[in-house]
Image (cartoon, helix red, strand yellow):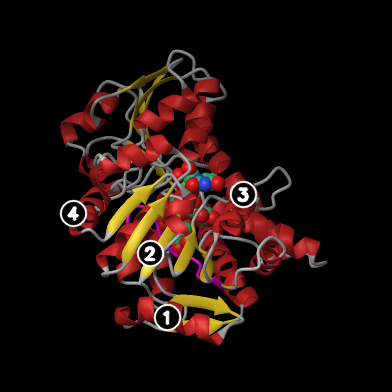
């Protein structure tokens, strides 16, 4: 099938290269010409495991091309996927300015009938509104389809190839069938529905996962108060197939480009529709409070000020296997520790260039290795769940001067640290 993907960010670049890998003719469009040049020369604007190789494979097979011209991109396409960002607006709702910008251009440049599919996360009702908006600007026929994405950064290529399900919403049965053909080879369920249900499935899914995280984070606080161990509680809960083991890792809270904005946007949409979404209000509050719960653990040992203390901070990305720091709780915690007077020695395997842009250099040294950050620091704080942080050598751990480790991701082994004479503070495990 001939596909145009508009936006070469986390979703669009992965989407275009995977569609090409599935044997489609794909053209990726971005209004940022620098980005297009970078991608064409083999330099990825984002870190995502396997992406560089997949883009190179697509380009050399002839299935994948890129352009900064939307007109050239959509000309031959049968299906257009819109993958531009929908960031959080000032009032908590999704900011749709990029979607409208692209809709304007499509309406202007579209010469033959198309399927227009919004993959970006948009509030329920948006596809219909965009459909009317484009219809008022062109006489060319088109179908509207909602195909929300469920990709996790860090494993998005795998997530697309081994998806639990594909959701395709439209008021046109023919368009649903045509788009379905793209995904049928995956042998996973395809949920076919109306536009509004497809839009809401995305928000409900992300909000439910965020609820799971806030729930386990509250259970972790009960564990701290009662002496229970949250990892055992999560294991015991997760073995119940009705609950499932995933997304029950207690933490400093969820971040990233999706959960914070999507939960907030569903809360706002609900209130615009006249419904007060009680559970989501609590999920948002619990998540905001969770990093302070972690900071309180540090304050209990050190008091309010950290002047004169050098703190090793491992992790800056919002999660492992990404360089993305959008809404990263790790970055927020680093800011708080720095404001408390600490000198920070930071390390993240991929997110340091992005972090420097927002944190600057004042009070922070960006270290070349995790060992450089930890060695001879006063205490250690773990903020992102990178697997390699589990592999710190004993000699590095015992060089931490105050013998205190605060683990915001429950990565390390308390017994082992105890044997090294180190005090271990984590989330929900005595
Ligand atoms: C996506 C989604 O689309 C968002 O709704 C979802 O919830 C999270 O993932 P993401 O891929 O992370 O967004 O966005 P981003 O990395 O910001 O990339 C968007 C791309 O679109 C950028 O490269 C930008 O240059 C491009 N763009 C933006 C256009 O090509 N045209 C525009 O008019 C606006
Ligand atoms: C999410 C969704 O999972 C994906 O389906 C989607 O559509 C885009 O948004 P992503 O934001 O890439 O993906 O990351 P995800 O793996 O969901 O993690 C989100 C946040 O929750 C991270 O900050 C992570 O550290 C945190 N998290 C995750 C926890 O704190 N505990 C967990 O058990 C799982």
- Extreme-right residue of the structure: 274
Identify the residue under disc 4: 60
> What kind of element bears circle 3?
helix
Say if residue 430 shows up in the picture.
no
Identify the residue under disc 2: 232
Residue in the foreground of this view, choosing between 151 and 80: 80
Q: Say which residue appears at 55% left-offset and 73% top-offset.
A: 145
Residue 89 position in % (x across, y down): 67, 45
Q: Which residues are magenta?
A: 144-155
Rounded to the nearest angstrom, the CA distance separating label 4 from label 1 is: 27 Å
> What kind of element bears circle 1?
helix
Above or below 292: residue 368? above
> Which marked residue is nearer to the observer: mark 4 or mark 1?
4
Identify the residue under disc 3: 101
Residue 180: assigned label: 1
Rounded to the nearest angstrom, the CA distance separating label 3 from label 1 is: 27 Å
Q: Say which residue appears at 28% left-offset and 37% top-offset.
A: 349
Residue 217 position in % (x across, y down): 52, 55
């Amino acid at each position: 099938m001939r596909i145009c993907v508009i936006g070469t960010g986390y979703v669009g670049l992965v989407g275009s290269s995977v569609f090409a890998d599935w044997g489609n003719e794909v053209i990726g469009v971005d209004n940022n010409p620098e980005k297009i040049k970078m991608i064409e020369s083999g330099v990825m604007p984002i870190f995502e495991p396997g992406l560089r190789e997949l883009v190179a494979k697509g380009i050399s097979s002839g299935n994948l091309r890129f352009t900064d011209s939307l007109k050239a991109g959509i000309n031959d396409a049968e299906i257009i996927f819109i993958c531009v960002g929908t960031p959080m607006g000032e009032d908590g709702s999704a900011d749709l300015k990029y979607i409208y910008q692209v809709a304007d251009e499509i309406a202007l440049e579209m010469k033959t009938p198309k399927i227009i599919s919004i993959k970006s996360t948009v509030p329920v009702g948006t596809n219909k509104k965009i459909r009317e908006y484009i219809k008022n600007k062109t006489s060319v026929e088109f179908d509207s389809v909602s195909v929300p994405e469920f990709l996790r950064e860090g494993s998005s290529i795998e997530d697309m190839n081994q998806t639990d399900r594909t959701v395709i919403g439209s008021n046109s049965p023919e368009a649903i069938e045509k788009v379905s053909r793209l995904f049928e080879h995956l042998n996973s369920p395809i949920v076919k529905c109306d536009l509004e249900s497809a839009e809401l499935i995305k928000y409900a899914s992300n909000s439910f996962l965020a609820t799971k995280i806030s729930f386990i984070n509250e259970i972790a606080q009960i564990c701290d108060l009662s002496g229970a161990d949250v990892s055992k509680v999560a294991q015991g809960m997760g073995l119940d197939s009705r609950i499932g083991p995933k997304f029950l890792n207690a933490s400093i809270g969820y971040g990233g480009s999706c959960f914070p904005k999507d939960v907030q946007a569903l809360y706002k949409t609900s209130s615009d529709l006249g419904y007060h979404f009680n559970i989501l209000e609590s999920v948002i509050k619990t998540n905001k409070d969770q990093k302070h719960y972690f900071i309180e653990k540090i304050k209990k040992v050190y008091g309010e000020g950290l002047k004169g203390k050098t703190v090793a901070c491992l992790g800056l990305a919002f999660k492992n296997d990404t360089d993305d720091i959008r809404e990263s709780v790790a970055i927020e915690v680093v800011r708080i520790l720095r404001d408390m007077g600490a000198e920070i020695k930071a390390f993240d395997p991929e997110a340091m260039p992005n972090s420097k842009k927002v944190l600057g250099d004042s009070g922070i040294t960006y270290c070349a290795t995790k060992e450089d950050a930890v060695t001879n620091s006063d205490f250690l704080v773990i903020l992102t769940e990178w697997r390699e942080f589990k592999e710190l050598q004993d000699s590095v751990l015992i060089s931490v001067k105050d013998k205190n480790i605060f683990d915001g991701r429950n990565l390390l082994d308390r017994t082992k640290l105890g044997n090294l004479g180190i005090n271990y503070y984590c989330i929900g495990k005595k």
